[in-house]
Structures are given as C-alpha cells and as structure tokens.
Image: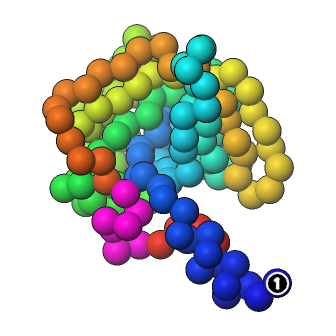
Amino acid sequence: MDASIRKKTLRMLSNGIYIVTSSSGARHGAATVTWLSQASFTPPLVMAALRRDSNVFRCLTESGFAVVHILDRGQQEMAQRFFRPTAVVGDTINGEPFVPGITQAPVLKNAAAYFECVLRHTCTLGDHAVVVMEVVDAECRAETSPLTVQDSPGEYGG
C-alpha cells in the first residue's frame, strides 16, 4: 500500500472538532478530539479515540466521567487552545472558563453545546484508545453549525 495515498484517503473521512474534558480528584484533562461518533441509540452511546498518553485519557479512565463539547464553526481559536497541554488557572482550563457538571467533569462555559458521559468500555489497541461512553446529560446553548476538520487549517488523520 502506498502510504501517501492511504493518508490522503483516510483524511477524506468527515470529522468534527470537539473538546473532551475530564477530571480525577484535583487533576483536570482537556483535549481537542476529531475521532468521535454516536454508536448507539439505546442506550445513547458515543465512541471516541483518545491518545493513550494524554492527561484527558488518564483522568477519564480514573474517574469514569467526561464531557464532550461541540464547537461552532467560529470557535477555531478555542479548539486550538486544547491542542496544548492542559493548564488550569483558577476557573479556567487553557484560558476557557469552566464549571463542574453533574458528573463533576469540567463543562466549558463558551461551548455551543455539550454532553456529559459515563465511561462504559475501553479498547486500547494502537496509539489511541477507543472509549465508549454513555450520554447522561446534554445541553444545547445555541443553534450552531458545528466545527469540522474541513473548516480548519489543520489536518489530522491518515
């Protein structure tokens, strides 16, 4: 297989850009994620691929809770902040204000929509782990056109 063709072809998959947050005790993790999809209606499940060496993955596997934030197309700058290591200062993560959600995982105040999840299963093949999470709460703060990889200058995948 030609690696450049494989990379180009896999980058044709349509992916949204989301921010996933979690916490374990006083430690917080947050990351921009592009590999995420709904997996079941009943119960409502989503699956996401998270870097196995990330702080958000460690917090999620320790606490069992996470929040997935949906961003508007105009929130590219916000997404970029979470490609960096997690930095918590006061009530902010990477400069974004947050509050604890019903699961106690951090909810970003400026995200267009979010849903809180309970971890149900983890598969750790490859450099990313696939996590299956059940949605236990959701809020849509505004009608939005969700941010996608195609809307951003970056490329991830392949």
Depth order, front residue of 31/157:
157
Position of residue 65 relative to residue 3, above or below, is: above
Depth order, front residue of 118/40:
40
Q: Magenta span has 150?
A: yes
Q: Is residue 142 left or right of residue 64?
A: left
Relative image position of residue 44 (x, y in whole percent): 55, 19
Relative image position of residue 119 (x, y in whole percent): 64, 23
From where the camera sits, is residue 17 visible?
yes
Position of residue 66 relative to residue 148, above or below, is: above
Q: Residue 93 is drawn in which quadrant?
A: top left
Q: Which residues are magenta?
A: 148-154
- The residue indicated by pointer 1 is 1
Q: Magenta span has 101?
A: no
Residue at 82 percent of width and 84 percent of height: 1
Position of residue 2 relative to residue 44, above or below, is: below
Residue at 60 percent of width and 14 percent of height: 43
Relative image position of residue 24 (x, y in whole percent): 56, 25
Q: Is residue 88 left or right of residue 85?
A: left
Depth order, front residue of 14/110:
14
Residue at 27 percent of width and 59 percent of height: 76
Which amino acid, mark 1? Met
The quadrant in which the C terminus is found is bottom right
